[in-house]
Image (spheres, helix red, strand yellow):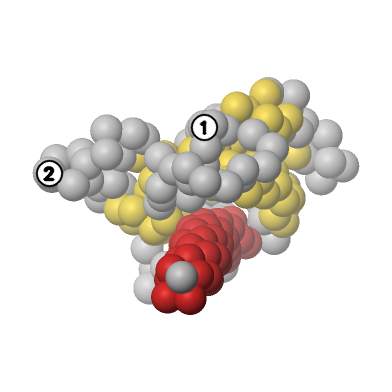
Amino acid sequence: MELMIAMALGGIVMTVLMTTFLSQHQVYLAQDQVVEMQQNARVAMDMLEQDIRSAGYDPDHLGAGITVADANTFAFTRDNEAGRLQTIRYALIDAFASLDRSDGVIDDLGRSVDGGGLQPVAENINQLEFRYLDVNGILTTELRKICFVQVSMLVQSSQRETKMHPGRNLYVTPSGVHWQAQVGFWNVYLTTTLNGRNLGL
C-alpha cells in the first residue's frame, strides 16, 4: 500500500514538473520569436533611416534626388563621393524566389544599388508603406518637394504561435489603410518620419 501511495505521489510530482517544463519551454520559444522579429524591424528601420538621410546628397551638382516615390517603392540617387550618382531602391520582395527556400510570400525588404537586383536586408516584413511630406509636413506627390519620408511597416514572427496569444492583429497606417496581421503570428507595427536632409532644398 505504501509503495502504491509513493508511486502515485511520484507520478503527480513528475506530471507537475513536466507541465512546468513544457510551459517554460513554450515561453522561451515565444520570446525567441519576438526577439528575432524585433531585430528584423530594427535592421530594416536603421538601414532605411541611414539611406533616406543621404538621399539627394549632391555636393558636385550631379542632379541627385528622388526618382520613384510611391506607396510601396522608394528610389533615389546620391553622390557616391567619387563623382558619380549612385541609385538606391527599396521595395518588398520574395527573397529566395529563385531558390528552393522560397516561402512564396513577398515579405522581405529588398534594397538594390545602381540598378542591381533587390537584395534582402530584413525578412518577414508583412506590410510596407511610404508616404511623402513637404517642408511643412503636408502630403505631396511632387518629387522635388519631398522633404520627409514617412515609413510604416508591419513585421511578423517567422513561425506561427500555437500555444500563446500573440495579441492585436489590426493596425491603421497614417494614410488610413487597415493592415490585418496574419492570425497566430507575433507582430510589431512601426511608423516613423525620416528627414531627408538633402531633399526639398
The residue positioned farthest toward the top in the image shown: 177
Residue 97 vertical placement versus 45 (above, below): above
Point out residue 169 in the picture as x, y percentages from the top left corner: 64, 34
Q: Which amino acid does label 2 sit on?
A: Asp
For numbered disc 2, what is the local secondary structure?
loop
139 sits left or right of 77 in the view = right
Tag 1, which secondary structure?
Answer: loop
Q: Name the residue under label 2.
A: 100
8 or 41: which is nearer to us?
A: 8
Say which residue appears at 18% left-offset and 47% top-offset: 101
Is disc 2 surrounded by few (<14), some (14 to 19) or many (20+) residues within 10 Å?
Answer: few
What residue sits 47% from the left and 42% below the top? 162
Quadrant housing residue 96: top left
Identify the residue under disc 1.
Answer: 182
Q: Where is residue 35 in the image (x, y as percent from the top left)?
A: 54, 65
Q: Is 163 on the left-hand or right-hand side of 173?
A: left
Front residue of 81/46: it is 46
Q: Where is residue 4 in the image (x, y as percent from the top left)?
A: 43, 69
Q: Which residue lies furthest to the right in this view?
A: 136
Dot 1: within a 10 Å radius of its alpha carbon, few (fewer than 14), some, or many (20 or more) residues?
A: some
Left of 110 or right of it: where is 13? right
State the CA–CA distance, disc 1 to disc 2: 23 Å
Res 35 visible: no
**Residue 86, numbered label:** none
